[in-house]
Image: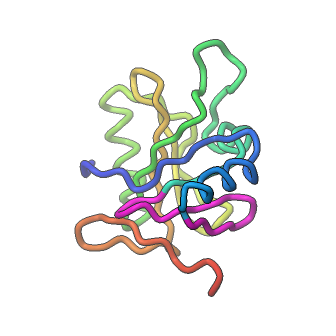
Amino acid sequence: MEQRVSLITLGVADVARARAFYEGLGWRGQEVSGTVFFQAGGLALVLWGRDELARDGGIDDRSAGGFGGVALAQNVRSPEEVDAVVAAAERAGATVTRPPATTFYGGYAGYFTDPDGHVWEIAHNPGFTLTEDGSLILPDFGAL
């Protein structure tokens, strides 16, 4: 697994309120299907409804010590790489919470938690550009 984080997704109670907060800090977001993306250097900060994020990751958000409302993501270059990284994580001691599968956005992704319960998504999203060094560049969602 490459030492790289592509996206940090914050599970929020109110996406509009959270977007207004970050835009109040001077950030510029792009909303797509109720999810807000902010380009943040070579990675992206994403705001998504906490319930939707927990459900997408196969995480129980109601248990004590459960989901903390944050998911780290690494975007990779192919569905096969998603499979390989998730398998390597499982061999290393991760718990696969959602096996790799086709996603609602036309990509391919799986989720796991590390031994301390931190949530990781490994994803291939054909709409996002990965540079040679692995930096993520968001598309112009308004042009789509």
Comparing 107 with 53, the one in front is 53
Spot occupied by residue 11 in the image (x, y as percentages of width and height): 64, 41
Could you tell me which residue is drawn at 55 percent across and 34 percent down? 97
Magenta stretch, main secondary structure class: strand
Could you tell me which residue is drawn at 69 percent across and 67 percent down? 32
Q: Is residue 99 left or right of residue 114?
A: right
Q: Is residue 43 left or right of residue 125?
A: left
Is residue 36 found inside the magenta-colored segment of the image? yes
The relative height of residue 16 versus residue 118 in the rendered view (above or below) is below
Could you tell me which residue is drawn at 37 percent across and 67 percent down? 77
Could you tell me which residue is drawn at 55 percent across and 55 percent down? 25
Using the rendered view, name the quadrant where residue 54 is placed: top right
Colouring used for the render: rainbow
The relative height of residue 74 versus residue 141 in the rendered view (above or below) is above
Is residue 37 found inside the magenta-colored segment of the image? yes
The relative height of residue 115 versus residue 55 in the rendered view (above or below) is above
Residue numbers of the magenta segment: 28-44
Using the rendered view, name the quadrant where residue 136 is placed: bottom left
Comparing 134 with 44, the one in front is 44
Spot occupied by residue 79 in the image (x, y as percentages of width and height): 44, 62
Comparing 84 with 14, the one in front is 14
The relative height of residue 21 versus residue 144 in the rendered view (above or below) is above
Spot occupied by residue 31 in the image (x, y as percentages of width and height): 68, 66
